[in-house]
Amino acid sequence: MKPVNIGFLGFGTVGQGTATVLTRNAAEISRRAGQDIIVKSASVRSTNRTLDPLLADIQLTDDSESIVNDPDVDVIVEVMGGDEPARSLILTAIANGKHIVTANKALIACHGGEIFEAAREHGVSVAFEAAVAGGIPVIKSIREGLAGNKIQWLAGIINGTCNYILTEMLEKDREFEDVLNEAMELGYAEADPTFDIEGIDAAHKLTILASIAFGVPLQFDAVYIEGISSITREDTAYAQELGYRIKHLGLAVDTGNGIELRVHPTLIPERRLIANVNGVMNAVLVHADAVGPTLYYGAGAGAEPTGSSVVADIMDVVRVASASVANRVPTLAFQHDALIDTHPMKSEEFQTAFYLRILVEDKPGVMAEITKALGDESISIEAIIQKEQLDGSSKVPIILLTKKIVEGAMNRAIEKLESLDSIEGKVTRIRMETLDAS
Ligand code: HSE
C-alpha cells in the first residue's frame, strides 16, 4: 500500500517529539496502521537548524504554504500554535483534501466550528487528541469509550504548568516566578505563559472537553476563568492543614438547570486520587451515569507524550480515510446536527463551598462581625482556624471553610466583609469541591 506522507506546520518541541516517535517506532506503527507513515516535510521559522540525526531526511522549509499545497502530502500536522496563520493554513489544506491533526487547543476552542464545517464539506477528518491533556487519550476515551453514558460532570487538572507551580510551592516552598521560569525552560509552558497561569490554556481545553462530554457547541467565551496568580504559599499550607490540596481545575458540570463551565483554583480533599496528581502531570476525572467515576492520568505536556497523541491521531485519520464522513466517529462526539446549544450558567449561579482567608484586627467582637456577614446570606461555616499573631503585627489571619452556597450570596457577603473596619484588605476566596463519586 502507498505510504502516507505527513507535512508538519511548525517543528518545535511537539513537532520534533512527534516525528521522533513516528520515525523510531515506524515498524510498529506500520504493523498497526497497515501502511507506512513517512514524515516528508516541516515548515520552520529558520531552515538553519540542526535536527537529531533520526530526523535528517525531513525536508525543512520556511514556506508553510508550500506544505499545505503539496499534492504529495496526505496529512497535515499543525503544531505551530496560535490563531493565525494556523487557521488559514488549515483551511487551505482542508480545501486541498488533506486530513488535519492538530495540537492547537486555542484554535479548536475558538475556531473549531468553522474548521469542522470546512472538513465536512471536503470529506476530510480533523483530529485533536493532543490539544487536551497532552499524552492522555482522554478525548478518545470520552468520545468513544464512554459513548453509551450520560456524562454528569468532569473535573480536570489540565494545565501542567499550573500544577507544577502549585506542587513546587507546597512541597518545596519555592517562589512562584522561580518555578514558572523552570516550566518555561522545560518546554511545558505556552509561548505566552500568562495563558497558563491566568487559566486561558485550561479554558481552551475545558471548552473542548465540555463539548464532547455534553454535545454542546464549542463556547470558549462562556467559560468562567480564574488563574493561579493570586494563590500564595500560605494558602497552599493552610489548605493542607485543613486536609485539602489546592489544584487548578477545569470543571464542566451538568447541573440539571444548566451547564457550569469554570476554570479556577480549587480546594480538593487530599484523600481524592486527583488531589495527589503532582508536578506537570495531568488528570481528568469523569463522572458518568453508567460507568460511574473514571480517572485518566498521565503526562499533560512534553515532546514525546504529546507526540504520542499526535501519532495516534495520524493513524486514526489514515484508517478512517476510506469511510464516508457519515460513518466516521463524529468529531465532537455527537452528530454535528444534534449538538444542543445550552448556554452555560453565569458565575453568580454556580454552587460551591468556599475557603476564605481574612486578615483581621486582633480584638474582641471581630469573629461575631464575620459570622454575622456570612449568616445574613445564609452561609454556613464548616471549619474555622485563627492563626497566631504574626511578629509585631496587630492583624491575624482567619481561615474559614463554608458549606455549599450559591456564588451570588458569597459575593454579597464578601462585599460586606471588605467594608468592615476590622478587616484589612481583600478577602481571599478559593472555591472547594468534594468531587464525590456518589
Ligand atoms: N502549557 C501547557 C501546559 C502545555 O502547561 O499544560 C500542554 O498543553
Image (cartoon, rainbow, N blue to C red):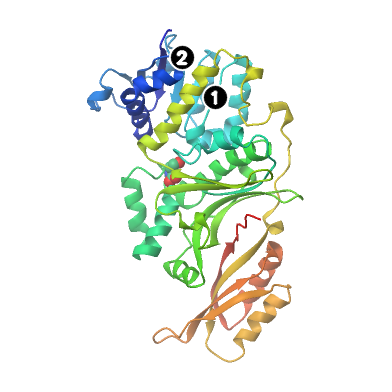
Q: Is residue 125 above or below residue 437?
A: above
The label shown at residue 310 is none
Quarter placement of the C terminus: bottom right
Q: Is residue 292 above or below residue 331?
A: below
**Residue 384: % across, % down:** 57, 78
Q: Is residue 74 left or right of residue 327?
A: left
**Residue 396: % across, % down:** 49, 82
* Residue 85 visible, this orientation: no
The label shown at residue 74 is 2
* Towards the viewer: 434 or 392: 434
The quarter of the picture showing ligand 1: top left
Q: Which residue is mark 1?
A: 126
Are there few (<14), some (14-19), or many (20+) residues within 10 Å of tag 2?
A: many
Which element type, helix, strand or loop, lies under badge 2?
loop
* Towards the viewer: 363 or 85: 363
How many discs mark residues in the rendered view? 2
Whether tag 2 and tag 1 are in contact, CB under 8 A, the answer is no
Residue at image location 60% in from the left, 34% down from the top? 143
Q: Is residue 272 left or right of residue 409?
A: left
Q: Is residue 351 left or right of residue 321?
A: right
Q: Amino acid at mark 1?
A: Val
In the rendered image, which quarter is residue 15 located in?
A: top left
Residue at image location 41% in from the left, 32% down from the top? 308
Residue at image location 62% in from the left, 41% down from the top? 210
Are there few (<14), some (14-19), or many (20+) residues within 10 Å of tag 1?
A: many
Q: Amino acid at mark 2?
A: Asp
Which element type, helix, strand or loop, lies under badge 1?
strand
**Residue 291: % across, % down:** 64, 44
